[in-house]
Amino acid sequence: MKQIVIILILLPLGLMAQKENSGVAPGASVAYAEEVGINLRFHYFPNHQVCFGIETNIFPQSGERFSNNQEITLNGHYIFPFSEHWGVYPIGGIGWKKHEEESGFRALTGLGLHGTFEHVQPYVEYIYGSGFQSEGILLVGTFITIQFGKHGE
């Protein structure tokens, strides 16, 4: 079931990526929220300031090989540039989290710092999930962008 949901979300993103001056960006980061985990993401950006996509956070527990603590999120950003290479952005979205045998939805809000250097985009984000298992998550990572059309014109 989860695979079908992911395909239904990623398929429209792939189709939207055919628009000129747009692109997609797979990325990964280290996540910290009481324990260290990983964040994997796939975002679509229709222009240089708007970005939205799907992410997953996975937190291994006490050395276990497979985690019972994971989350899938949908969120969006609007980047406010403050220099040639850097911008800040608010984060808004929704997440579904599974923790041990329980699961539930939560609202996501946060703030990020984003750099743009050719096809590499480092970022730092703080996201707070309110609702089921409320907590803050600090993310540090990078995107690799794949652009379509004529960027920068």
Image (cartoon, helix red, strand yellow):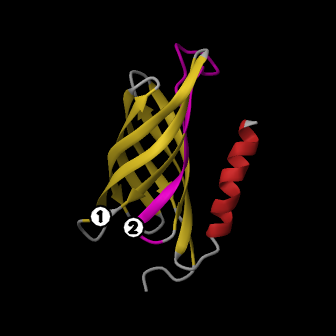
Label 1 sits on a secondary structure element that is strand
Q: Residues within 10 Å of mark 1 (few under 14, many from 20)?
A: some
Q: Position of residue 88 (x, y in %)?
A: 29, 57
Image quarter in which the C terminus is found: bottom left
- Which residue occupies the foreground of this view, 131 or 26? 131
- Name the residue at 63% across, 61% down: 13
Q: Is residue 83 left or right of residue 129?
A: left
Q: CA distance from mark 2 to mark 1?
A: 7 Å
Query: Is 70 included in the stretch rendered in magenta?
Result: yes
Residue flagged by tag 2: what amino acid is it? Gln
Image quarter in which the N terminus is found: top right
Residue flagged by tag 1: what amino acid is it? Phe
Mark 2 — residue? 49
Q: Are marks 2 and 1 in contact (CB under 8 Å)?
A: yes
Q: Quadrant of residue 102?
A: top right
Of the numbered discs 2 and 1, the one sitting upstream in the chain is: 2
- Which residue occupies the foreground of this view, 118 or 9? 9
Mark 1 — residue? 80
Label 2 sits on a secondary structure element that is loop
- Name the residue at 71% across, 51% down: 8
Q: Quadrant of residue 103?
A: top right
Q: Position of residue 68 (x, y in %)?
A: 60, 20
The label number, if any, that marks residue 46 in the structure image? none
Q: Is residue 96 left or right of residue 121?
A: right
Q: Position of residue 111 (x, y in %)?
A: 31, 47
- Name the residue at 70% across, 44% down: 5
Q: Is residue 25 left or right of residue 90?
A: right
Magenta range is 47-72
Q: Position of residue 110 (x, y in %)?
A: 34, 44
- Name the residue at 66% across, 52% down: 9
